[in-house]
Image (cartoon, rainbow, N blue to C red):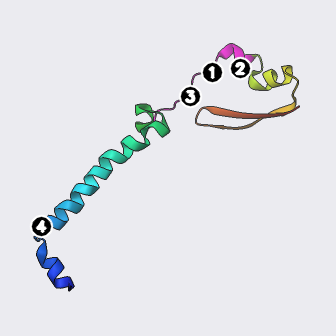
């Protein structure tokens, strides 16, 4: 088989229409596939999924105080990002 006979078997406009159709389907279906991984519609529009912090909890020392009350020594804040805080403590 030659490549010229393969190209002649398809109409000229059909190949491009197929490619454009597949790209449109990917652009529509890919965000729906990734939706559960990012937290629903709020993630699509850029809102943060973090819950608000209780002011009483934060004023009483927050997670560092809670870790130290449970017997952890040298508790500290590692990082804060996107409304989330990461802590560590040594038992």
Residue 33 horizontal/vertical position (percent): 40, 43
The residue positioned 84% from the left and 21% from the top of the image is: 70
Distance from Cα at disc 3 to Cα at disc 2 = 15 Å
SS class of the residue under badge 1? loop
Distance from Cα at disc 2 to Cα at disc 4 = 64 Å
Q: Which residue is mark 4?
A: 13
**Image position of 24 (left or right of 69):** left
Up-down: is 45 above or below 69? below
Residue placed most toward the observer, 57 or 5: 5
Nearer mark to the viewer, of 3 and 2: 3
Distance from Cα at disc 4 to Cα at disc 1 = 58 Å
Which image quadrant: the N terminus?
bottom left
User: Callout 1 environment at 10 Å: few (<14), some (14 to 19), or many (20+)?
Assistant: few
Residue sitting at the far front? 1
Q: Which residue is mark 2?
A: 58
Contact flag, marks 4 and 3 (Cβ < 8 Å): no
Contact flag, marks 1 and 3 (Cβ < 8 Å): no
Contact flag, marks 2 and 1 (Cβ < 8 Å): yes
Distance from Cα at disc 4 to Cα at disc 3 = 49 Å
Nearer mark to the viewer, of 4 and 1: 4
Which span of residues is magenta-colored? 46-59
Nearest to N terminus: mark 2 or mark 4:
4
Distance from Cα at disc 1 to Cα at disc 3 = 9 Å
User: Callout 4 environment at 10 Å: few (<14), some (14 to 19), or many (20+)?
Assistant: few
Q: Which residue is mark 3?
A: 50
User: Callout 2 environment at 10 Å: few (<14), some (14 to 19), or many (20+)?
Assistant: few
Nearest to N terminus: mark 2 or mark 1:
1
Q: Which residue is mark 1?
A: 53
SS class of the residue under badge 4? loop
Residue 59 horizontal/vertical position (percent): 73, 17
Distance from Cα at disc 2 to Cα at disc 1 = 7 Å
């Amino acid at each position: 088989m030659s490549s010229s006979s393969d190209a002649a078997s398809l109409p000229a406009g059909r190949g491009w229409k197929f490619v454009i159709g597949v790209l449109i389907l990917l652009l529509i279906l890919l965000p729906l596939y990734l939706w559960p991984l990012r937290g629903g519609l709020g993630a699509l529009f850029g809102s943060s999924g973090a819950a608000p912090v209780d002011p009483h909890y934060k004023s009483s020392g927050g997670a560092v105080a809670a870790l130290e009350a449970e017997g952890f020594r040298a508790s500290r804040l590692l990082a804060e990002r996107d409304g989330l805080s990461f802590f560590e403590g040594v038992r």
